[in-house]
Image (cartoon, rainbow, N blue to C red):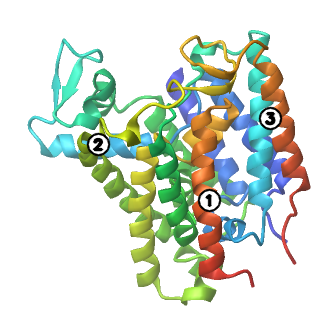
Amino acid sequence: MTRQWNWFTGGIALGVVFLLAVFLVKPIGVSTEFVILDGIVWNALSDNLITKSPDAKSGYSSTNAYLNKSGGSYAKNVINPIRYSPIFVLSMIVGALLSAKTGGPQPTAPDRIAPEVWRSRFGEGGTKRYLVTFIGGVLVLFGARLAGGCMSGNAMSGMMQTSISGYLFALGIFLAGIPLAIMIYDRK
Amino acid sequence: MELLLAVILGAAFGFVLHRIGASNPHNIINMLRLTDLHLMKAILFGISIASALLFIGLAVGVIEPSHLDVKTTYWGVLAGGIMMGIAWPLTGYCPSTAVAALGDGRKDAAVFVLGGLVGAYLYMIAYAHLEGTFLLKKLLGGNVTLALTPDPSCPALINGIPGVIPALVVAVILGLIAWKLPGKRV
Protein backbone atom coordinates (compact mmCIF):
# COMPACT_ATOMS: atom_id res chain seq x y z
CA MET A 1 0.00 0.00 0.00
CA THR A 2 3.00 2.22 0.25
CA ARG A 3 2.92 5.14 -2.15
CA GLN A 4 6.66 5.42 -2.13
CA TRP A 5 8.59 4.68 -5.25
CA ASN A 6 10.55 1.44 -5.23
CA TRP A 7 14.35 1.56 -5.32
CA PHE A 8 14.54 1.12 -9.09
CA THR A 9 12.20 3.95 -10.07
CA GLY A 10 13.49 6.08 -7.19
CA GLY A 11 17.13 5.45 -8.13
CA ILE A 12 16.52 6.48 -11.74
CA ALA A 13 14.69 9.64 -10.63
CA LEU A 14 17.45 10.52 -8.17
CA GLY A 15 20.14 9.90 -10.79
CA VAL A 16 18.33 12.04 -13.36
CA VAL A 17 17.98 14.98 -10.93
CA PHE A 18 21.67 14.86 -9.91
CA LEU A 19 22.72 14.60 -13.56
CA LEU A 20 20.40 17.40 -14.76
CA ALA A 21 21.71 19.69 -12.02
CA VAL A 22 25.35 19.28 -13.08
CA PHE A 23 24.41 19.39 -16.78
CA LEU A 24 22.43 22.64 -16.48
CA VAL A 25 24.12 24.48 -13.59
CA LYS A 26 26.29 22.72 -10.99
CA PRO A 27 26.22 19.75 -8.60
CA ILE A 28 23.49 19.74 -5.94
CA GLY A 29 24.44 20.97 -2.47
CA VAL A 30 22.37 22.13 0.47
CA SER A 31 24.37 22.60 3.67
CA THR A 32 26.19 25.77 2.53
CA GLU A 33 22.87 27.59 2.56
CA PHE A 34 22.62 27.09 6.34
CA VAL A 35 25.79 29.23 6.57
CA ILE A 36 24.34 31.80 4.17
CA LEU A 37 21.10 32.11 6.20
CA ASP A 38 23.13 32.43 9.42
CA GLY A 39 25.24 35.08 7.71
CA ILE A 40 22.16 37.06 6.67
CA VAL A 41 20.80 37.10 10.24
CA TRP A 42 24.20 37.81 11.77
CA ASN A 43 24.90 40.59 9.26
CA ALA A 44 21.54 42.21 10.02
CA LEU A 45 22.45 42.30 13.72
CA SER A 46 26.04 43.46 13.24
CA ASP A 47 27.53 46.72 11.96
CA ASN A 48 30.78 45.36 10.67
CA LEU A 49 30.44 41.64 9.86
CA ILE A 50 30.68 42.15 6.10
CA THR A 51 32.17 45.14 4.34
CA LYS A 52 32.76 46.08 0.72
CA SER A 53 36.38 45.55 -0.07
CA PRO A 54 37.77 46.22 -3.54
CA ASP A 55 40.92 44.24 -2.68
CA ALA A 56 39.01 41.01 -2.04
CA LYS A 57 38.43 38.68 -4.97
CA SER A 58 34.67 38.71 -4.43
CA GLY A 59 34.51 42.44 -3.66
CA TYR A 60 33.51 41.73 -0.05
CA SER A 61 35.39 40.83 3.09
CA SER A 62 34.25 39.72 6.53
CA THR A 63 35.50 39.85 10.09
CA ASN A 64 34.45 36.21 10.31
CA ALA A 65 37.22 34.00 8.97
CA TYR A 66 34.82 31.46 7.45
CA LEU A 67 32.77 34.02 5.51
CA ASN A 68 36.04 35.66 4.49
CA LYS A 69 37.68 32.53 3.07
CA SER A 70 38.24 32.03 -0.68
CA GLY A 71 38.34 35.76 -1.35
CA GLY A 72 35.15 36.45 0.62
CA SER A 73 32.91 34.35 -1.61
CA TYR A 74 30.50 33.39 1.21
CA ALA A 75 30.44 37.04 2.35
CA LYS A 76 29.38 38.07 -1.14
CA ASN A 77 26.69 35.39 -1.21
CA VAL A 78 25.31 36.60 2.13
CA ILE A 79 24.94 40.09 0.67
CA ASN A 80 23.27 38.77 -2.51
CA PRO A 81 20.94 35.96 -1.41
CA ILE A 82 18.70 35.99 -4.52
CA ARG A 83 20.87 33.44 -6.29
CA TYR A 84 20.61 29.92 -7.61
CA SER A 85 21.50 27.97 -4.43
CA PRO A 86 19.18 29.58 -1.83
CA ILE A 87 16.26 29.49 -4.29
CA PHE A 88 17.05 25.83 -5.05
CA VAL A 89 16.86 24.93 -1.34
CA LEU A 90 13.61 26.84 -0.72
CA SER A 91 12.08 25.25 -3.79
CA MET A 92 12.84 21.78 -2.37
CA ILE A 93 10.16 22.41 0.28
CA VAL A 94 7.62 23.13 -2.47
CA GLY A 95 8.68 20.01 -4.37
CA ALA A 96 8.13 17.79 -1.32
CA LEU A 97 4.74 19.40 -0.76
CA LEU A 98 3.84 18.73 -4.41
CA SER A 99 4.77 15.07 -3.99
CA ALA A 100 2.63 14.80 -0.86
CA LYS A 101 -0.34 16.43 -2.65
CA THR A 102 -0.08 14.27 -5.76
CA GLY A 103 -0.30 10.82 -4.25
CA GLY A 104 3.05 10.57 -2.46
CA PRO A 105 3.54 9.04 0.99
CA GLN A 106 1.66 10.86 3.76
CA PRO A 107 2.84 11.14 7.37
CA THR A 108 0.29 10.66 10.15
CA ALA A 109 -0.03 13.26 12.92
CA PRO A 110 2.29 11.32 15.29
CA ASP A 111 4.76 10.85 12.38
CA ARG A 112 5.05 14.62 12.17
CA ILE A 113 6.49 14.64 15.70
CA ALA A 114 8.60 11.48 15.64
CA PRO A 115 8.96 8.58 13.19
CA GLU A 116 7.38 5.22 14.02
CA VAL A 117 10.68 3.46 14.77
CA TRP A 118 11.57 6.22 17.25
CA ARG A 119 8.15 6.06 18.94
CA SER A 120 8.33 2.32 19.46
CA ARG A 121 11.77 2.72 21.09
CA PHE A 122 11.40 5.99 23.01
CA GLY A 123 7.64 6.54 23.30
CA GLU A 124 5.24 9.12 21.90
CA GLY A 125 6.47 12.20 23.77
CA GLY A 126 7.60 15.14 21.65
CA THR A 127 9.98 16.81 24.10
CA LYS A 128 12.65 14.12 24.02
CA ARG A 129 12.38 13.89 20.23
CA TYR A 130 12.75 17.64 19.75
CA LEU A 131 15.69 17.84 22.16
CA VAL A 132 17.52 15.05 20.33
CA THR A 133 16.77 16.36 16.83
CA PHE A 134 17.94 19.83 17.86
CA ILE A 135 21.26 18.51 19.18
CA GLY A 136 21.45 16.20 16.15
CA GLY A 137 20.94 19.17 13.85
CA VAL A 138 23.80 21.01 15.57
CA LEU A 139 26.10 18.00 15.14
CA VAL A 140 25.10 17.29 11.53
CA LEU A 141 25.57 20.83 10.26
CA PHE A 142 28.82 21.31 12.19
CA GLY A 143 30.01 18.01 10.71
CA ALA A 144 28.79 18.86 7.22
CA ARG A 145 30.57 22.21 7.27
CA LEU A 146 33.74 20.61 8.64
CA ALA A 147 33.53 18.10 5.79
CA GLY A 148 32.72 20.78 3.21
CA GLY A 149 29.30 19.34 2.31
CA CYS A 150 26.45 17.11 3.39
CA MET A 151 25.00 13.83 2.10
CA SER A 152 23.87 15.49 -1.16
CA GLY A 153 26.75 17.84 -1.82
CA ASN A 154 29.60 15.71 -0.54
CA ALA A 155 28.59 12.06 -0.72
CA MET A 156 26.18 11.90 -3.68
CA SER A 157 27.43 14.73 -5.91
CA GLY A 158 30.96 13.77 -4.88
CA MET A 159 30.68 10.07 -5.70
CA MET A 160 29.00 11.01 -8.98
CA GLN A 161 32.23 12.84 -9.88
CA THR A 162 34.34 10.00 -8.34
CA SER A 163 35.68 12.53 -5.84
CA ILE A 164 37.76 10.99 -3.04
CA SER A 165 36.16 13.40 -0.58
CA GLY A 166 32.75 11.89 -1.44
CA TYR A 167 33.90 8.32 -0.69
CA LEU A 168 35.63 9.44 2.52
CA PHE A 169 32.52 11.27 3.77
CA ALA A 170 30.22 8.33 2.97
CA LEU A 171 32.67 6.00 4.74
CA GLY A 172 32.56 8.17 7.88
CA ILE A 173 28.77 8.32 7.89
CA PHE A 174 28.15 4.61 7.58
CA LEU A 175 31.12 3.59 9.78
CA ALA A 176 29.52 5.48 12.66
CA GLY A 177 25.85 5.34 11.64
CA ILE A 178 25.25 1.62 11.10
CA PRO A 179 26.69 0.23 14.37
CA LEU A 180 25.09 3.04 16.34
CA ALA A 181 21.67 2.51 14.73
CA ILE A 182 21.83 -1.22 15.53
CA MET A 183 22.88 -0.47 19.12
CA ILE A 184 20.14 2.11 19.65
CA TYR A 185 17.18 0.36 18.02
CA ASP A 186 18.43 -3.24 17.69
CA ARG A 187 17.14 -5.09 14.64
CA LYS A 188 13.79 -6.40 15.80
CA MET B 1 17.22 31.94 -16.32
CA GLU B 2 19.38 30.45 -13.59
CA LEU B 3 16.77 31.39 -10.98
CA LEU B 4 14.09 29.60 -12.99
CA LEU B 5 16.33 26.53 -13.13
CA ALA B 6 16.79 26.82 -9.35
CA VAL B 7 13.02 26.69 -8.89
CA ILE B 8 12.57 23.73 -11.23
CA LEU B 9 15.57 21.66 -10.14
CA GLY B 10 15.00 22.39 -6.44
CA ALA B 11 11.37 21.35 -6.72
CA ALA B 12 12.36 18.22 -8.64
CA PHE B 13 14.93 17.28 -5.97
CA GLY B 14 12.47 17.87 -3.12
CA PHE B 15 9.80 15.90 -4.98
CA VAL B 16 12.10 12.91 -5.55
CA LEU B 17 13.45 12.90 -1.96
CA HIS B 18 9.87 12.88 -0.71
CA ARG B 19 8.60 10.31 -3.19
CA ILE B 20 11.38 7.79 -2.47
CA GLY B 21 10.70 8.14 1.25
CA ALA B 22 14.02 9.82 2.12
CA SER B 23 12.28 12.70 3.91
CA ASN B 24 10.71 10.17 6.28
CA PRO B 25 13.23 9.57 9.12
CA HIS B 26 11.65 6.16 9.73
CA ASN B 27 13.15 4.94 6.45
CA ILE B 28 16.58 6.45 7.12
CA ILE B 29 16.78 4.83 10.56
CA ASN B 30 15.65 1.46 9.17
CA MET B 31 18.29 1.75 6.44
CA LEU B 32 20.99 2.35 9.06
CA ARG B 33 19.89 -0.55 11.25
CA LEU B 34 19.83 -2.67 8.08
CA THR B 35 16.18 -3.70 8.20
CA ASP B 36 15.03 -1.88 5.05
CA LEU B 37 17.67 -1.12 2.45
CA HIS B 38 15.40 0.30 -0.28
CA LEU B 39 16.81 3.81 0.22
CA MET B 40 20.38 2.51 0.12
CA LYS B 41 19.59 0.71 -3.14
CA ALA B 42 17.98 3.84 -4.60
CA ILE B 43 20.92 6.06 -3.55
CA LEU B 44 23.57 3.71 -4.96
CA PHE B 45 21.60 3.17 -8.17
CA GLY B 46 21.08 6.93 -8.54
CA ILE B 47 24.80 7.65 -8.10
CA SER B 48 25.63 4.85 -10.53
CA ILE B 49 23.38 6.25 -13.29
CA ALA B 50 24.33 9.89 -12.72
CA SER B 51 28.06 9.08 -12.64
CA ALA B 52 28.02 6.92 -15.77
CA LEU B 53 26.07 9.49 -17.79
CA LEU B 54 28.16 12.38 -16.39
CA PHE B 55 31.44 10.83 -17.52
CA ILE B 56 30.01 9.78 -20.89
CA GLY B 57 28.65 13.33 -21.29
CA LEU B 58 32.05 14.80 -20.43
CA ALA B 59 33.82 12.42 -22.83
CA VAL B 60 31.61 13.34 -25.77
CA GLY B 61 31.61 17.02 -24.82
CA VAL B 62 27.90 17.43 -23.99
CA ILE B 63 28.57 18.44 -20.38
CA GLU B 64 30.46 21.63 -19.66
CA PRO B 65 33.57 20.72 -17.57
CA SER B 66 33.35 24.03 -15.67
CA HIS B 67 30.09 22.78 -14.11
CA LEU B 68 32.06 20.20 -12.15
CA ASP B 69 32.68 21.02 -8.52
CA VAL B 70 35.05 18.56 -6.89
CA LYS B 71 35.40 19.08 -3.16
CA THR B 72 38.73 19.08 -1.35
CA THR B 73 39.89 15.92 0.44
CA TYR B 74 41.21 16.35 4.01
CA TRP B 75 40.84 14.51 7.35
CA GLY B 76 38.00 16.83 8.37
CA VAL B 77 35.87 15.17 5.67
CA LEU B 78 36.10 11.85 7.52
CA ALA B 79 35.65 13.54 10.92
CA GLY B 80 32.60 15.44 9.65
CA GLY B 81 31.18 12.23 8.18
CA ILE B 82 31.56 10.49 11.54
CA MET B 83 29.81 13.41 13.31
CA MET B 84 26.95 13.12 10.86
CA GLY B 85 26.97 9.33 11.25
CA ILE B 86 26.60 9.69 15.02
CA ALA B 87 23.62 12.02 14.71
CA TRP B 88 21.94 10.31 11.75
CA PRO B 89 20.45 7.26 13.54
CA LEU B 90 19.15 9.56 16.28
CA THR B 91 17.50 12.13 14.04
CA GLY B 92 16.92 10.28 10.76
CA TYR B 93 17.60 13.56 8.95
CA CYS B 94 20.39 15.00 6.87
CA PRO B 95 20.26 18.65 5.77
CA SER B 96 18.54 17.95 2.42
CA THR B 97 15.97 15.48 3.69
CA ALA B 98 15.07 17.73 6.63
CA VAL B 99 14.41 20.62 4.24
CA ALA B 100 12.22 18.34 2.12
CA ALA B 101 10.46 17.09 5.28
CA LEU B 102 9.41 20.68 6.03
CA GLY B 103 7.10 20.29 3.04
CA ASP B 104 5.54 17.33 4.86
CA GLY B 105 4.79 19.49 7.88
CA ARG B 106 7.14 17.48 10.09
CA LYS B 107 7.82 19.41 13.31
CA ASP B 108 10.91 17.40 14.24
CA ALA B 109 12.40 18.43 10.88
CA ALA B 110 11.82 22.09 11.71
CA VAL B 111 13.61 21.59 15.04
CA PHE B 112 16.44 19.83 13.21
CA VAL B 113 16.80 22.77 10.81
CA LEU B 114 16.96 25.20 13.76
CA GLY B 115 19.64 23.03 15.37
CA GLY B 116 21.41 22.96 12.00
CA LEU B 117 21.50 26.75 11.85
CA VAL B 118 23.11 26.76 15.30
CA GLY B 119 25.60 24.07 14.23
CA ALA B 120 26.56 26.00 11.09
CA TYR B 121 26.99 29.14 13.21
CA LEU B 122 29.24 27.27 15.66
CA TYR B 123 31.36 26.11 12.73
CA MET B 124 31.65 29.69 11.44
CA ILE B 125 33.03 30.64 14.86
CA ALA B 126 35.27 27.57 15.14
CA TYR B 127 36.74 27.88 11.66
CA ALA B 128 39.40 30.44 12.66
CA HIS B 129 40.75 27.90 15.18
CA LEU B 130 40.56 24.90 12.84
CA GLU B 131 42.24 26.69 9.94
CA GLY B 132 45.86 25.62 9.75
CA THR B 133 45.38 22.42 11.77
CA PHE B 134 45.87 18.94 10.30
CA LEU B 135 42.08 18.57 10.04
CA LEU B 136 41.80 21.00 7.14
CA LYS B 137 45.14 20.21 5.48
CA LYS B 138 44.72 19.05 1.88
CA LEU B 139 45.37 15.37 1.14
CA LEU B 140 46.36 13.78 -2.19
CA GLY B 141 46.55 17.17 -3.89
CA GLY B 142 43.21 18.58 -2.68
CA ASN B 143 40.23 18.31 -5.02
CA VAL B 144 41.21 14.86 -6.15
CA THR B 145 39.08 12.35 -8.05
CA LEU B 146 39.45 8.68 -8.86
CA ALA B 147 38.76 9.08 -12.59
CA LEU B 148 40.39 11.72 -14.75
CA THR B 149 38.06 14.68 -15.46
CA PRO B 150 38.49 17.43 -18.09
CA ASP B 151 38.97 19.94 -15.25
CA PRO B 152 42.74 20.60 -15.24
CA SER B 153 42.68 21.81 -11.62
CA CYS B 154 41.55 18.36 -10.38
CA PRO B 155 44.26 15.73 -9.98
CA ALA B 156 43.14 12.13 -10.58
CA LEU B 157 44.36 8.94 -8.88
CA ILE B 158 44.00 6.94 -12.10
CA ASN B 159 45.89 8.65 -14.89
CA GLY B 160 46.86 7.66 -18.40
CA ILE B 161 43.48 6.26 -19.41
CA PRO B 162 40.33 8.24 -20.23
CA GLY B 163 38.31 8.98 -17.06
CA VAL B 164 35.20 7.46 -18.54
CA ILE B 165 36.69 3.94 -18.20
CA PRO B 166 37.30 3.85 -14.41
CA ALA B 167 34.13 5.90 -13.87
CA LEU B 168 32.06 3.31 -15.74
CA VAL B 169 33.72 0.47 -13.82
CA VAL B 170 32.81 2.14 -10.52
CA ALA B 171 29.30 2.89 -11.78
CA VAL B 172 28.76 -0.76 -12.73
CA ILE B 173 30.01 -1.90 -9.31
CA LEU B 174 27.68 0.54 -7.51
CA GLY B 175 24.80 -0.55 -9.74
CA LEU B 176 25.47 -4.22 -9.01
CA ILE B 177 25.57 -3.56 -5.26
CA ALA B 178 22.26 -1.67 -5.56
CA TRP B 179 20.72 -4.58 -7.44
CA LYS B 180 22.07 -7.35 -5.18
CA LEU B 181 21.40 -5.77 -1.78
CA PRO B 182 18.30 -7.18 -0.10
CA GLY B 183 15.28 -4.90 0.10
CA LYS B 184 13.02 -4.86 3.11
CA ARG B 185 13.69 -7.57 5.70
CA VAL B 186 10.50 -9.44 6.63
Viewer-nearest residue: A140 or B107: A140
Instruction: Residue type at mark 3: give it.
Output: Val
Taking the spot 47% from the left edge, 70% from the top edge, the residue there is B107
Instruction: Residue type at mark 1: give it.
Output: Leu
Q: Is residue A139 left or right of residue A115?
A: left
Whether the residues at callouts 1 and 2 have beta carbons within 8 Å, the answer is no
Q: Residue B185: x and y, percent?
A: 85, 73
Q: Residue B9: x and y, percent?
A: 61, 35
Q: CA distance from mark 1 to mark 2?
A: 25 Å
| Eye-nearest disc, 1 or 2 | 1
Give me the chain letter of mark 1.
Answer: A
Disc number placed over residue A8 in the picture, else none: none
Give me the chain letter of mark 3.
Answer: B
Residue B105 versus residue A167 in the image, above or below = below
Give the quarter of the figure containing the N terminus of chain A: bottom right
Which residue lies under the disc numbered 1?
A175
Taking the spot 84% from the left edge, 69% from the top edge, the residue there is B184
Which residue lies under the disc numbered 3?
B170
Residue B186 in which image quadrant: bottom right
Earlier in the chain: of badge 2 and badge 3, it is: 2
Whether residue A107 appears in this view of the structure is: no
